[in-house]
Amino acid sequence: MAETVTFRRSPGPGRCRQSPPARGGRASVPSPTGRMALVRASRPRHGAKTSRHPRQAAMDTLQVVNTRISAEDLRAAGRVLGAAFASSPLERAVRGTIDDRQRRGLVRAYTAACRLPGNVSVAWRDDRIVGAIRWVESPRCQLRWNQKLTMAPTAIAAFGRGLPRAMTWVSAWSKRDPSEPHVHLGPIGVEPALQGRGIGSQMLAEYCDRLDLAGEAGYLETDKPENVRLYERFGFEVGCHAFVLGVQNWFMWRESTRPSPVTSGERSIDPEKEVRQP
């Protein structure tokens, strides 16, 4: 059975028109700082079936409210992603043995990733963050030179002697980034002890819902074959694959679809009102 989780998405500064709470828990709440987040509380309806496609089930049982997300939440997201990616074949090719020092480096690296331009959602279980997902629209998914210079001290601290290998990894992924407009997914991760319980699928549903409402294409990279099968369930197809640092990587694309009519008259995410990180 899928875990009950709450999603908080951290877009950046912008405006969100206030509206009164609607039946079903939807509301738009402005943040005094301009930093907004999306909260999705998973509350199954009475008698709801659980054997449906994971994405559709997640969409049916999630309620949406806009609220503020704190800097500490972003740090917590980095900690979860760091733990999740300790098993990444690419991270192991870069870092070697994942000891305590390397685990701290992982947390540092993924916390920095959460602070990059884009959107970050976090999954809550009880009162703690157990999953995180980030996406960003092209061409902002490729860092500019000034951004790379700004991140250089963090990269040195996060990767240490593995920095040249990390740069090879980033370069291999960057040169395969599609020229077509897309929304780039990554990273996505769930606390290791809770993996396999549907939390990642619900986060992917949040991302795919946003794509379908906006009629945008999705793109991602992965270094795990089991992830390929998961992403294929959400409409991704393998465009190509390549070996990076001796590790097989898959580069996957999800075709854009036009927004379908919303019979309820409400949208969980309105692309025209969506706010983003700078």
Image (spheres, helix red, strand yellow):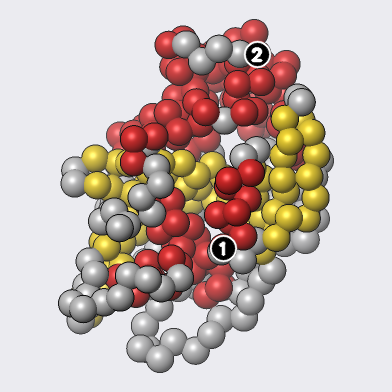
Number of dots carrying numbers: 2
Q: Is residue 163 left or right of residue 240?
A: left
Instruction: Look at the image and tell me whether residue 31 can be seen.
Output: no
Residue depicted at x 60% and y 21% = 92
Between residues 217 and 136, which one lies in front from this camera angle? 217
Quadrant for residue 214, please give it. bottom right
Which secondary structure, mark 2?
helix
Mark 2, other Cα within 10 Å: few <14 / some 14–19 / many ≥20: some
Mark 1, other Cα within 10 Å: few <14 / some 14–19 / many ≥20: some
**Which of the two discs, 1 and 2, labels the residue nearer the N terminus?**
2
Q: In this view, does 160 lie to the left or right of 51?
A: right
Q: Separation of disc 1 and disc 2 at Cα?
A: 34 Å
Q: In this view, does 264 lie to the left or right of 254?
A: left
Q: In this view, does 265 lie above or below 89?
A: below
Circle 1 is placed at which residue position?
A: 233
Q: Which mark, by number, is residue 99? A: none
Instruction: Identify residue type, mark 1.
Output: Arg
> In the rendering, at what x and y percent does residue 86 appear?
50, 26
> In the rendering, at what x and y percent does residue 91 appear?
60, 25
Instruction: Look at the image and tell me whether residue 90 can be seen.
Output: yes
Residue depicted at x 47% and y 47% = 133
Which secondary structure, mark 1?
helix
Which is more foreground, mark 1 or mark 2?
1
> In the rendering, at what x and y percent does residue 274 appear?
46, 65
Residue depicted at x 34% and y 41% = 194
Circle 2 is placed at which residue position?
A: 162
